[in-house]
Image (cartoon, helix red, strand yellow):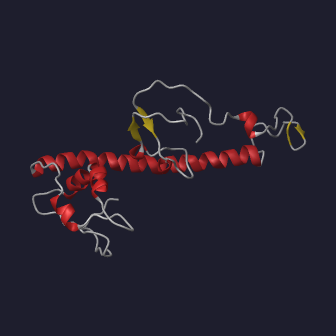
Amino acid sequence: GRVATNAIPLTTNQACCNLLVNDGSDYRFVYYALMNSFESLAGAAKGAAQNNLNAGQIREFQIPWRPLDEQSKVADVLWTIDDLIENNRRRIKLLEAAARLIYRDWFVRLRFPGQEIAKFEQGVPESWERMSVARAVEFNPRESLQKGEMTFVPMGALSENGMTVDAHLTEIRNTGTTVKFRNGDTL
């Protein structure tokens, strides 16, 4: 996550490396340069019980460099986009909560539009029908895909309580997979 080292007192344990950005460098630019290099950094981690990067590895790691004014311009744009993404995540959570409440009201408490005049049979409106999940959905449908690049969604990219996929965690792969899905599917 983002930490503004100059804004708050900060302490860490022995498994963390603190980076203090020098004058002439925009700490946000350094943050994005390191985040963009996450895969390379993670690939360089070593350890028996737990992979770690040591301070020497981080010191020698190469990142792109621009003059301070260019760093600030790039960082301003990326920081603004990250703030918009975070605002949208908060909105999505609120909308998902609203959707759950509406579902609960309409289909559990049966307080749906027109419920005052609806005729009920066995506790549900007569026009409704109960069915098994297996009848309502198709489980792991088979679908042929053309070979080539495709987006791979690891389990960690799926929300545990929402309706979104974390696009930052998806990968482009050239290998096939046995499970396929489309936008709108429930995973």
**Along the horizontal axis of the image, is 56 left or right of 172?**
left
> Is 121 above or below relative to 28?
above
Picture residue at 15% right of the left edge, 59% below the top: 60
In front of the other: 108 or 51: 51
Picture residue at 28% right of the left edge, 74% below the top: 9
Percent x, y for residue 32? 25, 51
Picture residue at 55% right of the left edge, 44% below the top: 163
In front of the other: 159 or 2: 159
> Is 151 above or below relative to 54?
above
- Name the quadrant of the C terminus: top right
Percent x, y for residue 47? 33, 66
Image-quadrant location for residue 136: top right
**Along the horizontal axis of the image, is 170 left or right of 34?**
right
Percent x, y for residue 107? 74, 44
Percent x, y for residue 8? 29, 71
**Along the horizontal axis of the image, is 75 left or right of 171?**
left
Picture residue at 35% right of the left edge, 50% below the top: 83
- Name the quadrant of the N terminus: bottom left
> Is 32 above or below relative to 12?
above
In front of the other: 31 or 119: 31
